[in-house]
Image (cartoon, rainbow, N blue to C red):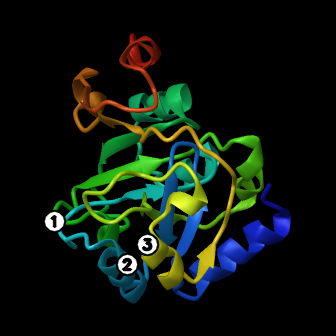
Amino acid sequence: MLTADDAATFERCMAVGGVAVFPADTVYGLACDPAIDDAVQRLYAMKGRSLDKPSAVMLFSVDLAFAALPELGERERAAVEALMPGGVTFLLPNPARRFPLACGDDPGTLGLRVPALPPSAAALRAVRWPVLQSSANLAGQPEARRASEVDERLRAAADLVLDGGELPGTASTVIDLRAFAQGGTWQIVRHGMVADDVVAAALRGL
């Protein structure tokens, strides 16, 4: 069970350019400050992930997401409110080129996560820092549902490891909303934690 001290330590780790292993609502992730180039490069190197591949930016409440992305339109905000917090990642248009280090080779698209944290990790809801988040596994390897399943090389290289117990073990559902504001169209590009019919019901009519 994570504590308020754990959440504060996580924020300090982000602030100084560290990399943390942490529990989300789906699988264990790696996190760093998305504005610190050295931290992002280190996280990618730890995973063996190419820097041209995007990662999501995670914020720990919907209000923080709206504050970080003030250009979101009415329809996109409605989609966020309908499915977040939750086990989804939204691909959103990024006209302001926010969090460019998280966007890989497509700065016009931003991946957004707001997790529905389980009780064991609920203390992280107090975190106000945006984080670049990627699953805590070596590139191409399975995701971890327990801290002990995170590859020992990643745990050893991280500056902080937070153990929030066992997670569901299914990655987030990735939903492309880049055309949603114009015509209400969307597409699931990765099936995951949130079922397709739940996504469809939530976005219908927005």
Q: Quadrant of residue 172?
A: top left
Instruction: Report the residue at 26% width, 26% height from top.
Output: 186
Disc on the earlier residue, 1 or 2: 2
Residue 60 in percent (x, y) is at: 62, 52
Please tell me how many numbered marks the rendered image carries. 3
Whole-percent x, y for residue 24 in the image: 57, 51
Q: Quadrant of the C terminus?
A: top left
Q: Identify the residue under disc 1.
A: 105
Left or right of 13, for residue 199: left
Q: CA distance from mark 2 to mark 3?
A: 7 Å
Decide if residue 196 is on the left or right side of residue 104. Answer: right
Categorize mark 2 by other alpha carbons within 10 Å: few (<14), some (14-19), many (20+). many
Q: Which residue is mark 2?
A: 40
Instruction: Determine the residue positioned at 44% across, 68% down.
Output: 151
- Alpha-carbon distance for marks 1 and 2? 14 Å
Name the residue type under label 3. Pro
> Can you identify the residue that label 3 sits on?
34
Q: Secondary structure at mark 1?
A: loop
Q: Is residue 33 visible?
A: no
**Is residue 47 shown left or right of residue 23?**
left
Which SS class for mark 3? loop
Looking at the picture, how far across and down is residue 97, in whole percent? 29, 64
> Which residue corresponds to the image point at 33% horizontal and 71% vertical from the top-left?
47
- Taking depth in this image into account, of 157 and 15 the one nearest to the observer is 157
